[in-house]
Structure formats: C-alpha cells, structure tokens
Image (cartoon, rainbow, N blue to C red):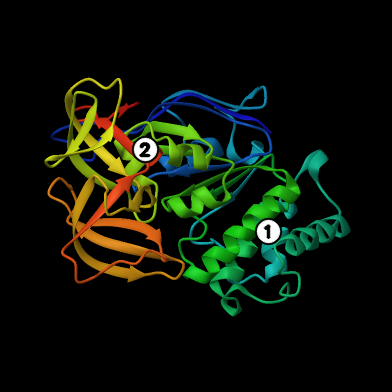
Amino acid sequence: MKVVLQNLTKVFPSRDKKSGKEVVAVNDFTFEIPDGKLIGLLGPSGCGKSTTLYMISGLQKPTSGKIFFGDDDVTELSTENRGIGLVFQNYALYPHMTVKQNILFPLQNLKGKDKMTKDEMLERAYYAAKLVQIDELMDRKPSELSGGQQQRVAIARALVKMPRVLLLDEPLSNLDARLRLQTREEIRRIQKETGITTVFVTHDQEEAMSISDMIVVMKLGVLQQIGKPQEVYDNPQNLFVAKFLGTPPINVFNGQVANGKLILGENAVLDVPGVADQNVIVGIRPEGFEVDPAGTLECQLTNLEVMGRDVSVVSTHVASQNPLVRSIVDADNKIDLSAQTIRFSLKPHKVFLFNAETEERIYF
C-alpha cells in the first residue's frame, strides 16, 4: 500500500498562556512511501517523527495537509477504519491476558463482513505468532516473558489483522543491545516476508540505516533529506544530516577556501576546484583519513584505540570544532605513539564542505 503525505502540518497550542506561541511539530511535510517498502523516520527527540506516525495512524489529526493510502484520502478517516497496525514503544500488552488472547484481541473486535469464525481467528493468530517466533509461548502471560518476547507479541498483535500499513514507534528502545540487534533483524525479515508497507520511527541512526529501504531525516518538524541509507550517508545535503549520521560521528572543522584550496589551520589540505573563496565548515568522515608521512593534514597525536581490524586514531587539531579528532584506519598501519604528531592525506569523497552561515552543502 502506497502512502502519500501531502503538505502535512501539525501545530499544537502553546502551554504558555502568556506568550501564546504555538508549537509547530511537523511543518509542511511532503513524502511518498512506496508500496511494500520499509521507511525509517529518523531524527533527535522532538523532531516530529512520532507526531508524523500518529497522524498516519489517525491518532492525531493534522492541522493541514492530506494523507492518502493508495488513492484513498484517509485524512478524516478514523483509526480503526484505516487498516493500520501500530506497535508502541512500551508494548501496551494486556497484562491479564495470555499471549494468545492478546494476539486474538484485534480479530475479536471485527464486525460485519470482516467478522471471522473462531477457527479462522486461531489460524490467523498462530500464523502471526509463528512469523515472530513466539508460537510456543501462546499460553503465557506478559509478566512471564522477557522484554524481547513482549515486543514480539506486540508486533504479532499488529500483524494479525494483515494491515495495509504497519507503524512502529521506537519499538526497540526498551531492549538491551543484543536484543535490539536481534529484534531489528526480525522486523526486517517479517517485513520482507509479508510485504507490508512499514514506517519505523527511531532516533537511533544505526537502527534506521541497517533495516530501512529509505530513511527520512527530520529536524524540528522539517524534512531535511530523503534517500537510501548509504546515499544519505555518502551525500548529506546539510551539516545537520552529516553530523546526525555516522558512528563515530563526523569530524567537524572550521576552514577557509582560497584559490581553489581548502585550508585547515595554516595548511592547504585538499584541492576544491570551483569553490569560491570563503569561510566554510568542513566535515570529514572518520574513515576519510589515510596515515601518510607526507600527508597535508597534521594533527597532534593523543591516543590509539584498538578495535581489531581497525584502529581509531585520537588526535587534536587547532581548527577542529570538537575537542578530539577520530580517524578510523587499518590496523596494519604502524603508528608510533611516542610521536607528538601524525600526518594524514584525505579521501576527497569523504570530505564535505558546508556554507558557514546556512550550513548547506557546497559541492566540489
């Protein structure tokens, strides 16, 4: 099911009666979610991603704009008639019911032509449980399950109606690191098996990039960039996107462009043909450094962090906006820790320039 958001805006009234200033949670959001794809809505807390999800679900009405499921305008349609499955961050399971009863509950409320027989409901419930691999836990109650198992029950309950659209609101945030990894892989597998159009809300960029067909990066209710995860990582349109994506985060420097050269500190470190002379903000991905005794970028060596096949070189530079510069290099590099400085050459495709005032990307 294709989902189209058309100039979607959500404004909340101010809590401060004196100022009367309204809060724009989502601002003129336009986006088409292709049929059968998993889309990651990504951004920091307060960026409007959950509000967008709740407008798609019908739990919140947009102040303006339209929502289409396929060719159907569902903007004014009630939640129960939209054909959505919604999974909350806190599971929201009924504690007095068994796993089976929790999964069956949405089917028991179907009426009219959608009403099912008891056998049909059981068959559908066990199918959903098997999808999320909890079919052996059907007689347990939520209190007898681990956090990961409870989340699987919540997903099964959302899937059992075979929704047109599946909506996941930070479904992994209450799980430990290992369970998060396992469950996100399960969500991707289930989505591929069912082919249900899925919107996955998260503030964790690693989660979004690892399982999404496309990611949508938001900031303060405004759409920043849409694209395939690797494309957005490799070609951020502005400084916010560049800083938000990547672990370790991108290294940010204050620089200048003069006569087609990028200058950091006192040294020209890279040719940037076609860029006008100006002050710039420079982003360099951690993997954009190569240890090179003849390199153009000289940093003050601080420490080495061994990561196995890679080494994180921790250094400082006078032009860096951050206290430390982190460079990920191959562990085969022989680095003398007793040396005070280390030199790097830079990979041009891992270096991004941004306008010092607007923070928009400058291409070279």
Residue 144 in sight in this render: yes
Residue at numbered disc 2: 348
Quadrant housing the C terminus: top left
Amino acid on which disc 1 is placed: Ala
Residue 157, above or below 225: below
> Which residue is at 50% across, 49% downward?
208
Residue at numbered disc 1: 156
> Which residue is at 68% across, 55% downward?
189
Task: Tell which residue pokes out farthest to the bottom in this image.
Answer: 144
Residue 112 image offset from top left, x and y in percent: 79, 40
Closer to the eye: label 1 or 2: 2
Identify which residue, 31 or 118, lies in the foreground. 31
Quadrant assignment, res 78: top right
Q: Residues within 10 Å of mark 2 (few under 14, many from 20)?
A: some
Residue 261, above or below 295: above
Q: Judge left or right: residue 175 versus residue 158.
A: left
Tag 1, which secondary structure? helix
Tag 2, which secondary structure? helix
Q: Distance between the residues labelled 1 and 2?
A: 46 Å
Q: Residues within 10 Å of mark 1 (few under 14, many from 20)?
A: many
Q: Judge left or right: residue 256 versus residue 151.
A: left
- Total numbered circles: 2
Amino acid on which disc 2 is placed: Pro
Residue 94 in sight in this render: no
> Which residue is at 20% across, 62% downward?
301
Residue 280, above or below 90: above
Residue 100 image offset from top left, x and y in percent: 72, 67
> Which residue is at 75% across, 50% downward?
193
Quadrant assignment, res 303: bottom left
Identify which residue, 69 or 330, lies in the foreground. 330
Residue 186, above or below 270: below
